[in-house]
Amino acid sequence: MDSIRKNLVQILDDARKLSTATQDEIDMWRRKAQWALVDVVTPELPVGVDIQVDPEILGLYIATMQAVRNTGCPLHIADVLSKNGFGEYEPRGAIWLWSGLNYTGRVKVAIHEIAHWYMHGFYGKFFTSMPPRLYKEQAAEAVTYAVCRELELDCYQYSVSYIAHQIKSASRYLLRIDGLIDAASVIVTSIKTNMEAQTNE
Ligand SMILES: [Zn+2]
């Protein structure tokens, strides 16, 4: 899929450029982008944007949760925010999503965690050593961006600042683009198949 490759290359390139900005600037971008994914009032986060659920987003949400179930990986929606962020795959080997996320946020975060499962869990078992966490985060978020673009969901600001943050903290690792394309294609196909199944019901 040409568009997946193009979007992966673009987000990694843009993130590399953004990583030369100051840490404060990158963090500001990230915080702004995070708010759009959240729909509850917490001390840190103001009210998000899509509390009213549009039926298309709801359909996408259901299809994405089905894609999580198709991995065979346990799924939990947790009321407590994980110390690792809005979602978690490692270290417990289950996918956790924070209940404070709006539907768009849950879709985006679930895709990120499926990307970890696909690249660093299921296939990860075949490696003798795991790549460092900052490398895995860059890979999972680049895949998330490419998948969201295929699903017409815009998470550019979030993804570019998240990856830039990882590059800034670690220096860039060389990512195997073919591996990323492979992961993104599998996830897109799974979600789209689930959406088609909904319309055929
Ligand atoms: Zn991650």
Image (cartoon, rainbow, N blue to C red):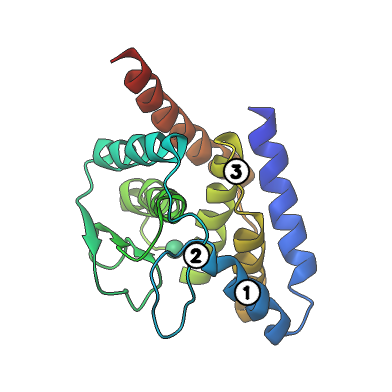
Is residue 141 depicted above or below 90 in this figure? above
Residue found 29% across the figure and 36% down from its top: 66
- Name the mark on residue 50: none
Three-letter code, disc 2? Gly
Q: Residue 25, located in which quarter of the rendered image?
A: bottom right
The residue identified by callout 3 is 146
Residue found 65% across the figure and 59% down from its top: 174
Three-letter code, disc 3? Ala
The residue identified by callout 1 is 165
Cα separation, mark 2 vs mark 1, equals 22 Å
* Ligand 1 shown in quarter: bottom left
Cα separation, mark 3 vs mark 1, equals 18 Å
Q: Position of residue 148 (x, y in %)?
A: 55, 43
Pointer 2 or 1: first along the chain: 2
Q: Secondary structure at mark 1?
A: helix
Labels 2 and 1 touching (C-beta < 8 A):
no
Q: Residues within 10 Å of mark 1 (few under 14, many from 20)?
A: many
Residue found 47% across the figure and 70% down from its top: 47
The residue identified by callout 2 is 48
Pointer 3 or 1: first along the chain: 3
Q: Residue 54, located in which quarter of the rendered image?
A: top left
Labels 3 and 2 touching (C-beta < 8 A):
no
Q: Residues within 10 Å of mark 2 (few under 14, many from 20)?
A: some
Is residue 161 depicted above or below 149 in this figure? below
Is residue 156 depicted above or below 146 in this figure? below
| Ligand 1 within 8 angstroms of badge 1 C-beta | no
Q: Is residue 51 left or right of residue 147?
A: left
How many marks the image carries: the answer is 3
Q: Secondary structure at mark 2?
A: loop
Is residue 54 depicted above or below 119 in this figure? above
